[in-house]
Every structure is written in C-alpha cells, then in structure tokens.
Amino acid sequence: MTDDKIYRKIEKLRDPARLAFLETEKVVDLCLQGITAHAVLDVGTGSGIFAEGFAGRGLKVTGVDIQEPMLEAARKYVPGAAFQLASSEKLPFADHTFDLVFLGLVLHESDRHLSTLQESARVCLKRIAVLEWPYKEGGYGPPLSHRIPSGQLHHLAETVGFSRIREIPLTFLILYLLEKE
C-alpha cells in the first residue's frame, strides 16, 4: 500500500460520520463502567480512535497494531500513549499487565480468533471489551462471512475461561464485555 493510500485510509477512519457511527464516547464509558482501571491495551489500535478516548479519561494507554503507518498516525493523535508494532495473536507484554484490554473491530480481522482472545486474556487483569459488527447483513461493514456470530463469540470467551459475558447492542455495533472473576 502506498503512503498516499495509507493516508487516505487514515483520513477515512477518522471521518466525522464514521466517528459518530462508532459511538466512541459511549463505548469507552461502557468499557470502564463498574471497574477501576488505570492501564488499557488497545489491540488493533489503527489510528488510535479508541486509544484517544481512553487517554481522555486519564488512563495509561498502550496500543498495538500490525501496520506501522497506523501506529505513526496514532502517535500523532494520542501523543501521551505508547504504541508498538505487534500482532493480536502474540502480545509482547507480561501476564496481567492491563486492567482492560480493548479489541475494537479487530477480532473478526484475526485469522485465529481463539489465539487472539487467549493472548488478550493472558495480559488482562479485569476485563476484555470486544467491539464487533452484528451478525447480520447491512449496508455497512464487512460481508456476513467475515462477521462473528454472537454464539461463536460467547463460545470462544467461555473456552478462554470467561464465565460472565455481557452483550450490549449499540446503534450499529455490539459491545461484548468479558469479565475475569
């Protein structure tokens, strides 16, 4: 992908209409509701949209992504956060490093959903929040074949060891909160 295409993609990700669609502030509030969090990991951070929301709450934010140009953009938008190149399936952090691990529209992108959730659970102390597309056809988002059915996500979370899973429907997306006991 050329630099020109990457920068157009970043601009598209941060388009005001898309930001409204993501309901970033509401998602951040729901992710933090009922827990005391100090450190957050934003997996698949992209240009740092949600990292920016968490940082705005005074949290210590770390973001990872597999695309260095995205990380460069995230560093620009969220200068107080730490960003590094890493795969969701092999996170370069010690066990139980983060109070909250956030996966915003990234789990469906992983070739190995279970590995991504296992790694997220390993570095998580309290909660994993997974923002995903609903499993239905729509005029937005990826095709149905790239979306994760709710039952499959529940099964994956239970396999990783989460017994409490909340599913919160948003206007266009679904937020899953996976609680550590």
Image (tube, rainbow, N blue to C red):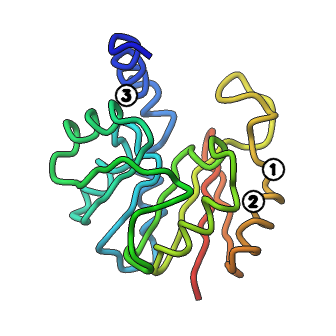
Q: Identify residue for label 1.
A: 149
Element type at mark 3: loop
The quarter of the picture where the C terminus appears is bottom right
Give the residue at x 24% y 55%: 82
What amino acid type is highlighted by mark number 1?
A: Pro
Circle 2 residue: 153
When the figure is inspected, residue 31 is found, relative to residue 179, above or below; the finding is: above
- Please, what secondary structure does the residue beneath circle 1 have? loop
Residue type, numbered disc 3: Arg
The residue at 78%/55% (across/down) is: 150
Which x, y percent locates residue 115?
65, 61
Q: Which mark is residue 14?
A: 3
Location of residue 19 (image quadrant): top left
Q: Is residue 138 left or right of residue 174?
A: right
Real-space Cα separation, disc 3 to disc 1, in angstroms = 27 Å
Q: Residue at x 43, y 69 (%)?
A: 100
Distance, label 2 to label 1, CA atoms, is 6 Å
Give the amino acid type for the residue marked by disc 2 in the picture: Leu
Mark 1, residues whose alpha carbon is within 10 Å: few (<14), some, or many (≥20)? Answer: some
Upstream in sequence: badge 3 or badge 2: 3
Indicate which label's residue lies in the foreground, 3 or 2: 2
